[in-house]
Image (cartoon, rainbow, N blue to C red):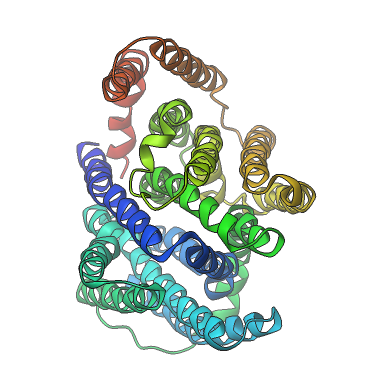
Amino acid sequence: MKRFFSYIFLALVLNALIKPASVLVENAVQNKIGHYEWGKYAAWLSLCFLLGPLCDLGINTFATAKLAQSSTDIKTDFASFLGIKVFLVVLYPVLLLLFGWGMGYHGQELGYLLLIAIITALGQLSDLFRSAIKALQAFALESIFSVLEKVILLAGTLALLYVGIDLQDFILLRLLVVGITLGIIAGIVFRKIGIPLLKIPQNGEAILKGSFVFTLTILLTSANEKIDQVLLKNLIGNTETGLYSGAYRWLDAINMYLWTILPFFFARFAFLIKDLAAQQKLLNIGQIMSATPLVFMGAWGYFFADKLLFLFPDSSCEELSRMTHFIQILFLGAALNATFAVFGTLLTSSGYSKYVNVGFAITMIINILLNLLFIPKYGGIAAAWVTVFCYAIIGMSYTYILKSYTKLQIPYFQTFQLIILFVALFFGFFLFQKTTISWLLQSVIGGVFTLVFLFILKWKEIKELKSIWKKG
């Protein structure tokens, strides 16, 4: 148990140090490039993210689950996944190039889209190698790999900001960095398991069949997360998309907490798939660990969102006000999403992805329809509220599936406690606004209150993880 927590703690510390710095530096880049140019980049990036599952087909997630349960030589099993993955990595940029051309991109824009597609593909290949590391339960290495690309990109971006930067420089830097990161991670994995023979495996059809449900999950998740920015660009324009992207970057930043710890739980849920009692304990503590920090951020962001935009000195007051409003809404969504996110992690790691996909599909349709209906009139405000609404639908679908198709108990009372925590924080910050206490001290007081709430009410559940870890 101590090692399990130490790995999660290491990952959180590394991401807490690196991710905020990366976000701040990207804010500075956007400020230099301008909201209009950044809006174009955000739309291209969202399009590649939206179609990213075509480069993955669920293989990364399927590999993590299967390799974690593998009783044979992991090198042999990994070779099967790698052969298919390399083929997809080569094919994906070509498909994106054709798709972009069909959407009307030409010349320089089409070239930029191709470069971002290559960046996405190489990143997906890096994630497959990280799947092997997670399957080996080598969580210390995974913690380092989770921030490796960000560290290199941060250093390169700071250098470019010093000498002068434009959009092309930033995209080329990202291409260089993702290539370096892939080389480092692949080299370490090969040293651990050996270099597998690269070929399309004979069991490729079985792998694709097994990963298909994960493909749908990732595709539908991507659509729900990024379709708003694609629609904003086409319905409103680049500037509004740039402003929304600047705010959404902070949503991605705090959600990085979930992306950091939930893969640990995914691998552990898969490992404990035959032990329902252990899964139940892990589900309970997983909800506490994943939701509590973002519940705090949801309340904090409503009152102090403007404090996150200090690196936009070239933006007008109206632009800053709009970005602040976006952050306030999106942070509420983050708190809602985090409350139920571990439910989805358990379901996808335990063979219930097809049910999860139905919920995602329904949510995606609602997402697109609401955005098409309200974005033309309300712009990014509509996109932000639709995001929150869709998080609510997804959370309800997780809860329904967990109750209907598994033998696990839904932690209703624990969920109610998290709601009480949010209400208490929100009300506390509201009262603080009527005092002369600085926003920084208010934040510290709110954070201390959250920690006290966590350890007084949930220390028993945290201690119970010892029995779960001993099973590994």
Is 220 placed above or below 210 here? above
Q: In which quarter of the image is residue 25?
A: bottom left
What's the residue at 51%, 83% (across, down)?
114
- In the image, is 155 to the left or to the right of 304? left
**Viewer-proximal residue among 312 and 386:** 312
What's the residue at 71%, 60% (across, down)?
235
Where does residue 313 sit, x and y in percent of width and height?
36, 49
Where does residue 133 sit, x and y in percent of width and height?
30, 62
Q: Quadrant of residue 146?
A: bottom left
Is 163 placed above or below 247 here? below
- In the image, is 408 to the left or to the right of 64? right
Is 273 placed above or below 84 here? above
What's the residue at 25%, 70% (across, down)?
160
Residue 203 visible within the image: no
Residue 177 visible within the image: yes
What's the residue at 32%, 83% (across, down)?
196
Give the quadrant of the N terminus: top left
**Viewer-proximal residue among 117 and 383:** 383
Count of marks overlaid on the render: 0
**Viewer-proximal residue among 441 and 10:** 441
Where does residue 229 sit, x and y in percent of width and height?
60, 58
